[in-house]
Image: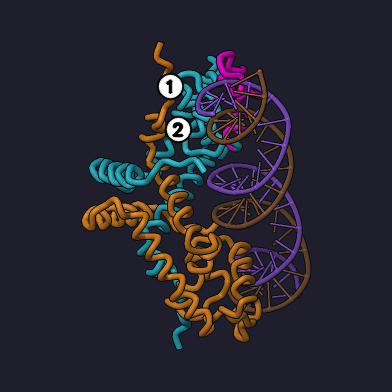
Chain colours: A orange, B cyan, C purple, D brown
Amino acid sequence: MTTTEPPTRPPQRLLALASWQANKVATLGARLTTRRMQLSARADFAVLAALEEYGALSQADIGRCLGLDRNDVNGILNRLEGSRHVDREVDPADRRRNVISLTPSGGAYLQELQAHTDAVQAALLAGLDPAEQRQLHQLLAKLLDTHPPQSA
Amino acid sequence: MTTTEPPTRPPQRLLALASWQANKVATLGARLTTRRMQLSARADFAVLAALEEYGALSQADIGRCLGLDRNDVNGILNRLEGSRHVDREVDPADRRRNVISLTPSGGAYLQELQAHTDAVQAALLAGLDPAEQRQLHQLLAKLLDTHPPQSA
DNA sequence: TCTTTTCGTTGGCCTATCCAACGTTGGCCT
DNA sequence: AGGCCAACGTTGGATAGGCCAACGAAAAGA
């Protein structure tokens, strides 16, 4: 009797789900990231990128444009402030707010993370040719565009 | 002076990243899921789908075909066994293994979850026309195919 | 003025992913 | 036979992400 062979593939019910696929791609990205940097550096990268593109921001604005919760932004900033990648000052014009600004050290850190991130992207998309990569990117962008940005 | 307008969009450095997009789509899927069922039901769905497609499996086989860690499979099965959706018996042919099998109740639960899952997919992909949905699905499938299946 | 909103902060909950270790069991090899 | 190694289930823990509730301070609106 042939021993019933163990399954190698995920069940069709899962393969059919775009959300399941997206999850798998996301954790794949996380795995590839771990090989090159601390996992939490992804969050740092996001915040630093926002500051670099938009200049000084309040914590709430950072959260809104990144789709992050205020609390989580706070935690990331504690880390970044601790390593002097970011300055945190009370906004004199609105003392409820903190003005978060990028330090030179933070800018350098951003460049460093960008290099690692690029490598991760290349590894993640290695199986697709350039045209397919562009297609995928555009489809994901369109999908995200149709959903309201929301930071919890 | 025009007060510097708060940014609404994520920075370009993030928009350019497929891994960031995948993460966002994944959490979007999670959010939509939460509206209809317990978040943890996604894991239940995956395990039940595997059992339904392949018949009785060992815990290790479940983990392998779903890409899950053995430990996590264990936790999911504790839940499913507690609600009688799954039977767990020692394999008489190999007493290291447990034979996990779907109960009628589990089959019904699977159908119920499938309905909710379908609704989530529809909501997630609502912004894409059918051809785009197919394209996205195929590109994600191809991407996942090029990466070795690995369960931690 | 009083009320409502925004902001930063603290603390906590749930899920996901992953790693390390243990005892049990089976297969393999000499 | 014996001894070694691999696989299995299980326990416990680490890190991370996403989310919610509540608080005091401060601003905006009525």
Residue occupying image coordinates x 39% and y 37%: A17
Q: Are marks 2 and 1 on the same chain?
A: yes
Tell me, yes or no, whether the highlighted magenta stretch contains residue B56. no
Circle 1: residue type: Tyr
Q: Which mark is residue B65?
A: 2
In the image, B10 versus D23, the foreground residue is B10
Mark sitting earlier along the chain (2/1): 1
Residue neighbourhood size for the residue with mark 1, other residues' Cα within 10 Å, grouped as few (<14), some (14–19), many (≥20): some
Residue occupying image coordinates x 47% and y 75%: A110
Instruction: Answer yes or no: is residue A92 visible.
Output: yes
Residue occupying image coordinates x 58% and y 71%: A59
Q: Secondary structure at mark 2?
A: helix
Q: Which mark is residue B54?
A: 1
Instruction: Answer yes or no: is residue B85 visible.
Output: no
The x and y percentages for residue A134 are: 26, 57
- Is A4 on the left or on the right of D1, as rendered? left
The x and y percentages for residue B8 are: 44, 68
The x and y percentages for residue A60 are: 57, 69
Residue occupying image coordinates x 51% and y 80%: A56
Q: CA distance from mark 2 to mark 1?
A: 10 Å
Q: Which residues are magenta?
A: B72-99
- Is B44 on the left or on the right of A20, as rendered? right
Residues under numbered marks 2 and 1 in contact, where contact means CB atoms less than 8 Å apart: yes
In the image, C30 versus A128, the foreground residue is C30
Residue D25 occupies which quadrant of the picture? bottom right
In the image, A5 versus A91, the foreground residue is A5
Relative to A70, say whether B82 is above or below. Answer: above
